[in-house]
Every structure is written in structure tokens, then in C-alpha cells.
Image (cartoon, helix red, strand yellow):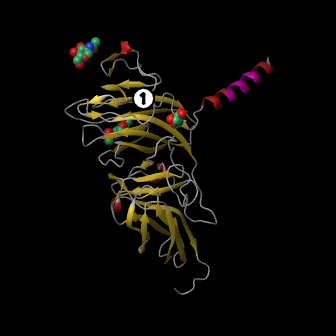
Amino acid sequence: MQAVFLVSVLLCATCYIASAITDGLLPNGNFELGPKPSEMNGTVVIGRQAVPEWEISGFVEYIKSGQKQGDMLLVVPEGAYAVRLGNEASIKQRLKVIKGLYYSLTFSAARTCAQEERLNVSVAPDSGVLPMQTMYSSNGWDSYAWAFQAEVDVAEIVIHNPGVEEDPACGPLIDSIAIKVLYPPKATNQNILKNGDFEEGPYVFPNTSWGVLVPPNIEDDHSPLPSWMVESLKAVKYIDSDHFSVPKGKRAVELVAGKESAIAQVARTIPGKTYDLTFAVGDASNSCEGSMIVEAFAGKDTTKVPYESKGKGGYKRAVLRFVAVSPRTRIMFLSTFYTMRSDDFSSLCGPVLDDVKLLSVRKPRRM
Ligand SMILES: *[C@@H]1O[C@H](CO)[C@@H](O)[C@H](O)[C@H]1NC(C)=O
Ligand SMILES: *[C@@H]1O[C@H](CO)[C@@H](O)[C@H](O)[C@H]1NC(C)=O
Ligand SMILES: *[C@@H]1O[C@H](CO)[C@@H](O)[C@H](O)[C@H]1NC(C)=O
């Protein structure tokens, strides 16, 4: 009797671990499994359970890559299928997660005919509205990241188009929805800043070469780029060494929206102490050429770091020495200029930032 009980407990423990989600695509996260022909009217999906693993509501279309809309050819980033969310339409999936952990979601979306598209991503009680006005990649598809903390064992992930377009079929296309556990980084005796090398961040699709946008106005503790905030209006781009040139490690950020996007972190400092903020500025080897400037801020102190990019990769190091005036110092970076890729004048790009370190200086020499 006891043995049976023990075995079932063990079995259940393993089955629980096995069933908790692993990093990568959600079940049918790329929508390659579609509705039966009887569950579609043209491209419109009929029935809430018609798309395997998902629950849909409202005007949802199942789109095949290569399908035409007017004179626009619809292309899909992963596999051959995607979904389109019309006005007030949503897709939903329930996932087993581990209560208390932080998760980031990454998904690809393309704007179609509407200009003011937005998506509301939610896992109750968290939600975030991601603006899609700015297209960063010229093929129309961008990947977006969003993060949440699991408050219960099951996360109900909802992506909703709150749009009110005249044409209900003018909503965004969605493809490739993935999840990744985020481990909150800690400050060390090597760095007062957390996640200064940007190694901890959202899932990056192995097969997409356009990085992941970390959208603006995300709260500190729920950032898909842990410990960092994206301030102001526009996103920063999270890039990986498989597809881009990165100064250190496997990940970095590209400041793609000029002064409209800034990345920041508040550090604990001791008033009166001298600190060095060191960082690497480079280019992602993505044909982003020209004179660039990264502005670094530490409280009221600031420096401008010029970088001449040939668009072929490379970086330089820079330092901002400052004396802290308060117990909390806001560290912030932005790019002075807008830059477009020389091979593609409709893709925004910019300088790369990586390996950001903040340390107090023992015996500052006069500079
Ligand atoms: C399919 O769509 C057309 C036009 O949108 C509509 O007239 C028709 O009633 C729909 N058929 C079904 C079975 O829902
Ligand atoms: C986004 O969706 C969530 C969950 O449905 C909702 O609580 C929230 O109010 C929505 N936000 C906006 C701005 O519509
Ligand atoms: C990436 O692309 C390769 C070749 O097209 C394909 O075999 C592989 O399954 C893709 N991986 C993912 C995660 O989609």
C-alpha cells in the first residue's frame, strides 16, 4: 500500500516536471496545425477550438504563406501558416507553469493594412499593450517580447487585438509564440548593475534574423530584459551572436530608435563616492553604417561616445567617471541619431550597447 503510494508520488513528481513548459515554442505556437476544412469559411476560422492547442474568439483568420491580400503578398516567418486577429479577436492558450517564476513571451507579428495596430498581451493579472506603429524590419515582421510573473500554476496566455478598424480583416498577423523562464540577475562584486551584459533576456528564435523588440514602458520588475527598463516611446532591439555581431557573450542590445528609445537601470550608489561606468559601443554587422553617438547618463553626468560604423561589426570601450550625489543613480543610454540600414532603407538600426559595468573607484586619480 505504502509502496504504491510512494510510486504514485514519484510518478506524479516526474510527470509534473515533464509537463511544465520548457523554453521554446508553445504547443502549436507556430500554427502549423490548422483547422479542419469544415471549420473554416474561406480563411475565417469557425469554432473556438478549431486551431489545435488554442482557443480563439472573434474574427480570426488562418493564413497560408504566399496568400494575397489586395496587392500585398503575405509571408510567414516560421513554417507556412499564421493567424490574423481582426477587431477584438483573441487567441488563448493555457500552460502549466511554475508559480513564482518569471517568464518572457516572444512572438512575431506583422502589421497589415491598419496603421495604428496594437496588441494586448496578458496573463492575468498582468497585461501589456504593445504598439505596432513602427515597423523595424522591412519584411513587415518583427518579434516582440513581454514578461510576466506566474501567480498560479497555470498561465492563461491571451493575445488580443483591441482594434476598431473599419475593415475587420485589417488586423495583425501573429506567428511563432515562444516562452522562456527568466532568472532575476543579481549584482555582484564585479558589477553594481544587474544583467549589464544583457545575457539574460527573452527567447530569440533560432530561425529569425531580426532580433527581438523589447517594447517601451514596461515596469521594472516585469521586464523581458531583466533589471532594465526601456524608457520613452520606442523599443530597443535584443540581438544575439548567432545572427549579429555582439561585443561580449551571446547577447546585446541595439539602440534602434534614436532619442526616442532609452534603456535605463537605477543603481545603488553611495553619495560622495566616485564610480566608473564602463560599456562597449559597436555595430551589429547588419549594414548599419555611418557616424553614430551613444549618450550615457549617470544621474546628471553624461558623456557622448562617437562610433564610426562600417556596418561590418566591431566595437570600442568607453567610460563615464562620476561622483554619486544620491543613494540611487539612474544609469541610462540612448542613441543620438536615427540610422537606416544601407542595404535596406526602411529598416531602423543603430549602435549596439553591451558589457555595461558600474564599479566604485577606490582611489580616484584626478582626471
Ligand atoms: C461564409 O462567409 C460568407 C461571407 O462572409 C457568409 O455569407 C456565409 O454565410 C458564411 N458561411 C458560413 C457557413 O458561415
Ligand atoms: C488588456 O487585457 C487585459 C486582460 O483582458 C485587460 O484587463 C486590460 O484592461 C486590457 N488593457 C487594455 C488597455 O485594453
Ligand atoms: C529552422 O530552419 C531549419 C531549416 O529551414 C529547419 O530545419 C528547422 O526546423 C527550423 N527550426 C525551427 C525552430 O523552426
Q: Is residue 206 above or below residue 46?
A: below
Answer yes or no: is residue 150 visible: no
Count of numbered circles in the view = 1
Q: Which residue is mark 1?
A: 80
Residue reaching furthest to the top: 38
Q: Amino acid at mark 1?
A: Ala
Q: Quadrant of residue 140?
A: top left
> Which residue is nearer to you in this view: 21 or 342?
342
The x, y position of residue 292, in whole percent, is 39, 67
Q: Which residues are magenta?
A: 6-14
Indicate whether 105 appears above or below 187.
above
Nearer the observer, 315 or 135: 315
Judging from the image, what secondary structure is the residue with disc 1 in?
A: loop
The x, y position of residue 324, in whole percent, is: 49, 75
Q: Residue drawn at (58%, 74%), measured in percent from left and top?
A: 360
How packed mark 1 is, by other alpha carbons closer than 10 Å (few <14, some 14-19, many 20 or more), is some
Residue drawn at x 49%, y 37% is: 178
